[in-house]
């Protein structure tokens, strides 16, 4: 990163939030060189016992916001929730990460574009070099139980696992139990609720792999 890029980042930050979350907030744990970098109108809500654990990459919140707007990005961790950020992660304006009580989201490195929503009730794991397009929804739970005649929940949360170097296309939805292999591409408007093979293009409702693919960011 060049010197002018660093100056631009520092110039545009919300400095009061930057200082608080990186140096005074005990719920943000810096284990490496990374910082939480909140831009103006970032909404950060960390519940009792919640932790944001940063590794060697920066976590940008509400970045790439159009000049002159008051667009927000939302980071909400409920009681005892955990967010682990290992390398660079950007949460664009109008995007949301919400982690319910006791749940975990772990991200290697990712760009999370505008209007994307990541909502965890159990565990969502993402590898390195993840590209999440606009309007993507990633859920590991239906968030409302369905009960059978025996009083048992038949739709419990199931972890979502996304491998390395995965591109999730515009307005796609990933449901509980999704597992996406390394290098896969999920086409726009797809619905994923199962396994997607590594190195393949997948599309449809439900999404199915139909060809091998290689892509570059």
Image (tube, rainbow, N blue to C red):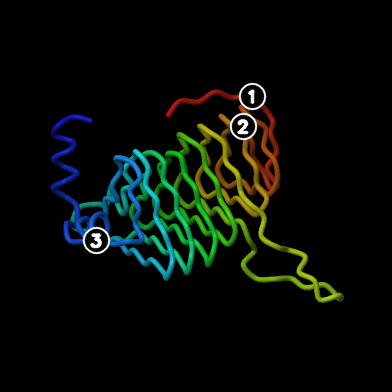
The residue at 37%/58% (across/down) is 94
Quadrant position of the C terminus in the picture: top left
The residue at 77%/65% (across/down) is 154
Task: Mark 3 vs mark 2: give the one in front.
Answer: 3
> How dense is the environment of label 3, judged by Cα within 10 Å: few (below 14), some, or many (20 and up)?
few
State the SS at label 2: strand
Please say if the residues under marks 3 and 2 sit with CB atoms less than 8 Å apart: no
Percent across and percent down for residue 130 are: 47, 38
Q: Is residue 86 depicted above or below 67 in this figure?
A: above
Marks 1 and 2 sit apart, C-alpha to C-alpha, by 6 Å
Q: Nearer the viewer, residue 79 or 63?
A: 79
The residue at 38%/39% (across/down) is 87
Quick one: label 1 or label 2, which is nearer the N terminus? 2
Q: Find residue 212 and name its label.
A: 1
Please say if the residues under marks 3 and 1 sit with CB atoms less than 8 Å apart: no
Q: Is residue 59 depicted above or below 25 in this figure?
A: above
Marks 3 and 1 sit apart, C-alpha to C-alpha, by 48 Å
State the SS at label 1: strand
State the SS at label 3: loop
Residue with the mark numbered 3: 24
Residue with the mark numbered 2: 201
Q: Nearer the viewer, residue 146 or 169?
A: 146
Left/right placement of residue 76 relative to residue 151 reads: left
Please say if the residues under marks 1 and 2 sit with CB atoms less than 8 Å apart: yes
């Amino acid at each position: 990163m060049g010197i002018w890029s660093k100056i631009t980042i520092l110039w545009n930050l919300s400095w009061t939030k930057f200082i608080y979350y990186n140096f005074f907030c005990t719920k943000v744990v810096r284990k490496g060189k990374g910082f939480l970098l909140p831009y103006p109108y970032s909404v950060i809500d960390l519940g009792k016992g919640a932790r944001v654990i940063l590794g060697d990459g920066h976590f940008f919140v509400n970045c790439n916001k159009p000049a002159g707007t008051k667009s927000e990005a939302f980071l909400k961790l409920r009681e005892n929730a955990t967010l682990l950020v290992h390398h660079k992660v950007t949460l664009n304006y109008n995007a949301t990460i919400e982690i319910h009580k006791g749940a975990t989201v772990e991200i290697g490195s990712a760009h999370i574009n505008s209007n994307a929503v990541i909502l965890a009730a159990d565990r969502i794991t993402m590898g390195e070099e993840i590209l999440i397009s606009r309007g993507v929804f990633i859920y590991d739970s239906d968030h409302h139980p369905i009960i059978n005649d025996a009083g048992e929940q038949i739709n419990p949360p199931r972890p979502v696992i996304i491998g390395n170097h995965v591109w999730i296309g515009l307005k796609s939805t990933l449901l509980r139990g999704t597992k996406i292999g390394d290098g896969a591409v999920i086409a726009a408007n797809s619905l994923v609720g199962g396994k997607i093979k590594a190195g393949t293009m997948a599309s449809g409702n439900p999404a199915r792999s139909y060809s091998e693919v290689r892509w570059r960011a």
